[in-house]
Image (spheres, grey):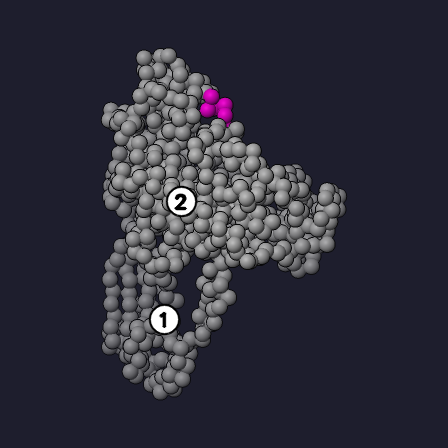
């Protein structure tokens, strides 16, 4: 008899099959003497839509709410049904004695496998493989310590309870809002608090009043000394009269009272998890969270040069240290050859700064694989993401950076002034990066790699001794306090990971729970949530900044308060953790969710608020004749029919990367067919044909073929759903 192993992804299945000696390969499974290894493709099975619980739910009507299934139904996801049937066929083979669940070691991984097995009606014994990495050693050890499937029944129950609770709240609240206000309004436990964070930031910016502040600067021998307030330690004050008085009464010389030199060490920044990588790619290259994830998936699945992207850990496990030399050899090419070769010759010390088993949950940090890399086979975008990951990997393995920090303190009269600078003694990990590199994630102004070198170099600092009296003249510096910046996709992803600041109640237990469970959404779902908010026209992009739309503001005014705060997620997670430990009843939790949902429906139904479209145009829909709405989609402006049942839409303009020949800003492409033209905010207009001809003459790479490829990409984007996961239901909506 054989054991059937079900992995979550084909790549993991291949690793397991290789270790287990499964030589026979097919498109849906691999087989050896003792084992058959097959895989899911993420979820193959999901909860059924409301329409499958009764014909009365096919039409969206407030009278049918709330929808609370007595017996929950599972359905096979159409797009991956072929793999589901292949897995089912293996389960019911007569020579299969038991099933080994080898999906990701976590709550959602357990759900993936259990739903497949439940839908198939499996009766065979279950065992569980629980590993945090897929190295050969980890797989062998995991299979030598398989645990009974029943040990994880409570974890499965918690995962299923979370899915059902999200379904009940999301489906009912969305239908209630849509029916009440006759508009496409969707809400949920994660997307609505995310939208509320954007609104909160905008309100903070709107209400911010800049305050002027002042300081003093003395430049001596090319060194800039900054005044420091003896009372507060700050380098600025809001009292202009005080600063002016200090400047007027100051003597013409500075006495150097202290020269402090200290050798310091700084370790490299941590390895990437998906959120950190998405944030940095957005800030450096303007990539959206979805783009970064898609690029990572290609590097992981197609090129096989980077490890699993959907991870929330920035550490490696101790069993991986033996593979680091092989990974160095694999990426030892092109710009990385010299650094990788140097590191390969040294002993790699796996210290706690990047190897910590306790800080790895389902997956370890993103690093290169042992697969030899061919850079010429990558696109420009893939090269950029690969470069970030490899340089960070090389930096972590490199020695610490050693630098000498010099701090000068002097007095002019009774006032204290300081100057600070540094010089690198041993570059260490900084050799991997350019000399002007800065860690985008670290916002601390005194981070070692953000030290500003003093004009004139280290010689100017070195020449200063204690007790010296130097001629000095003071100048007043001025500035204004600045509001917080608008969210970008990168900073929004980070805020979703740590949304404690946006909690209404400062409850320490809830705050700690949010921190431990990863905040709003997961690393795997946050990019989709952001896209969903864009596609629902609840938020829009202006340059790289995210702004809430009028529709988004109105939605937040209509949604019950509970659904707008991260506290709901925190409270759920506390309960779900208790269920996973067998300390709380799933049935009790779902009873409370149903009561809560009835309350939500009642609040929405009894509300006296109203919703109005303030983006109506004079353009009539060519299909139904109703006036159309102008919306700012992520890729440009669109006209969308206000009638949800009609669903007609057309693109008005698209954002492009084409630069204006006058002001060099990015232009928009408007019009259709031969009438297409580029338009710039500076007033420049240019026909597409003229643009193509100009680029051809310039010898630029954006030739006719490139533009055609771009147009094809834009057309594909225009066909993407403009709404959310309920788009199909909205299409058939009849009110």
Report the disc number at residue 593.
2
Label 2 to label 1: alpha-carbon separation: 64 Å
> Is residue 325 among the parts visible in the rendering?
no
Question: Residue 309: where, in percent of width, then height?
Answer: 41, 38
**Quarter of the picture holding the C terminus:** top right
Packing grade of label 1 (10 A; few <14, some 14-19, many >=20) is some
Of residues 277 and 9, the one nearer the viewer is 9
**Quarter of the picture holding the N terminus:** top left
Sequence-wise, which precedes: disc 2 or disc 1? 1
Q: Dot 1: what SS?
A: strand
Report the disc number at residue 223.
1
Q: Dot 2: what SS?
A: helix
- Quadrant location of residue 262? bottom left
Question: Residue 120: where, in percent of width, then height?
Answer: 42, 23
Task: Magenta stretch: give its range.
Answer: 80-85
Instruction: Report if residue 81 lies within the magenta region.
Output: yes
| Residue lying at the far right of the rendered structure | 674
- Quadrant location of residue 705? top right
């Amino acid at each position: 008899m054989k054991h059937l192993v079900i992995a979550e992804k084909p790549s993991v299945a291949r690793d397991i099959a290789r270790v287990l000696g499964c030589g026979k390969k097919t498109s849906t499974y691999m087989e050896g003497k003792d084992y058959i290894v097959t895989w899911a493709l993420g979820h193959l099975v999901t909860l059924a839509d409301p329409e499958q619980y009764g014909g009365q739910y096919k039409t969206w009507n407030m009278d049918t709410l709330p929808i609370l299934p007595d017996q929950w139904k599972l359905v096979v996801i159409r797009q991956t049904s072929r793999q589901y049937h292949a897995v089912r066929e293996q389960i019911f083979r007569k020579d299969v004695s038991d099933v080994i669940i080898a999906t990701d070691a976590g709550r959602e991984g357990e759900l993936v496998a259990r739903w497949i097995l439940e839908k198939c009606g499996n009766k065979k014994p279950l065992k569980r493989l629980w590993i945090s990495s897929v190295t050969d050693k980890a797989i062998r050890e995991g299979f030598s310590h398989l645990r009974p499937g029943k040990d994880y029944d409570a974890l499965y129950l918690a995962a299923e309870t979370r899915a059902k609770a999200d379904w009940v709240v999301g489906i009912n609240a969305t239908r209630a809002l849509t029916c009440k206000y006759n508009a496409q309004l969707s809400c949920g436990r994660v997307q609505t608090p995310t939208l509320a964070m954007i609104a909160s930031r905008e309100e903070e910016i709107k209400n911010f009043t800049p305050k002027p502040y002042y300081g003093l600067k003395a430049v001596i021998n090319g060194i800039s000394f900054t005044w420091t307030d003896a009372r507060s330690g700050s380098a600025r004050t809001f009292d202009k009269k005080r600063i002016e008085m200090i400047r007027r009464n100051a003597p013409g010389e500075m006495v150097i009272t202290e020269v402090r030199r200290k050798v310091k060490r700084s370790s490299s920044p941590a390895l990437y998890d998906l959120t950190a990588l998405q944030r940095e790619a957005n800030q450096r290259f303007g990539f959206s969270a979805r783009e970064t994830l898609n690029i990572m998936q290609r590097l992981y699945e197609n090129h096989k040069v980077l490890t699993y992207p959907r991870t929330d850990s920035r550490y490696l496990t101790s069993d991986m240290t033996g593979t680091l030399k092989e990974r160095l050899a694999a990426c030892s090419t092109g710009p990385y050859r010299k650094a990788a070769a140097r590191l390969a010759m040294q002993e790699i010390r796996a210290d706690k700064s990047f190897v910590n088993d306790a800080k790895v949950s389902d997956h370890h940090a993103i690093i290169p694989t042992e697969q030899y890399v061919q850079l010429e086979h990558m696109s420009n975008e893939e090269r950029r993401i690969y470069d970030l990951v490899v340089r960070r990997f090389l930096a972590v393995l490199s020695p610490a950076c050693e630098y000498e920090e010099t701090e000068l303190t002097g007095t002019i009269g009774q006032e204290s002034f300081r100057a600070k600078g540094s010089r690198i003694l041993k570059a260490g990990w900084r050799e991997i990066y350019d000399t002007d590199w800065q860690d985008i994630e670290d916002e601390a102004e005194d981070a070692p790699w953000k030290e500003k070198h003093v004009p004139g170099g280290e010689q100017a600092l070195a020449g200063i001794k204690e007790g010296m009296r130097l001629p000095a003249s003071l100048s007043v510096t001025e500035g204004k306090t600045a509001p917080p910046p608008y969210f970008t996709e990168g900073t929004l992803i980070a805020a979703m990971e740590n949304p404690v600041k946006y909690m209404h109640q400062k409850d320490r237990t809830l705050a700690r729970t949010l921190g431990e469970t990863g905040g709003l959404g997961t690393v795997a779902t946050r990019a989709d949530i952001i896209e969903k908010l864009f596609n629902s026209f609840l938020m829009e992009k202006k340059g790289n900044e995210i702004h809430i739309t009028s529709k988004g503001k109105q939605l937040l005014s209509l949604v019950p308060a509970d659904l707008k705060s991260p506290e709901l997620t925190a409270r759920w997670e506390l309960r779900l953790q208790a269920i996973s430990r067998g300390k709380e009843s799933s049935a009790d939790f779902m009873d409370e969710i149903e009561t809560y949902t009835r309350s939500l429906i009642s609040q929405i139904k009894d509300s006296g608020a109203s919703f109005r479209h303030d983006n109506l145009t004079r353009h009539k829909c060519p299909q139904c004749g109703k006036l159309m709405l102008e919306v700012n989609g992520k890729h440009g402006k669109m006209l969308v029919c206000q009638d949800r049942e009609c669903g007609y839409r057309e693109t008005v303009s698209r954002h492009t990367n084409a630069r204006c020949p006058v002001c060099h800003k990015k232009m928009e492409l408007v019009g259709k067919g031969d009438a297409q033209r580029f338009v710039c905010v500076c007033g420049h207009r240019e026909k597409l044909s003229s643009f193509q001809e100009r680029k051809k003459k310039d010898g630029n790479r954006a030739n006719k073929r490139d533009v055609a490829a771009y147009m094809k990409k834009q057309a594909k984007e225009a066909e993407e759903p403009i709404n959310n996961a309920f788009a199909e239901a909205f299409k058939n909506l009849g009110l």
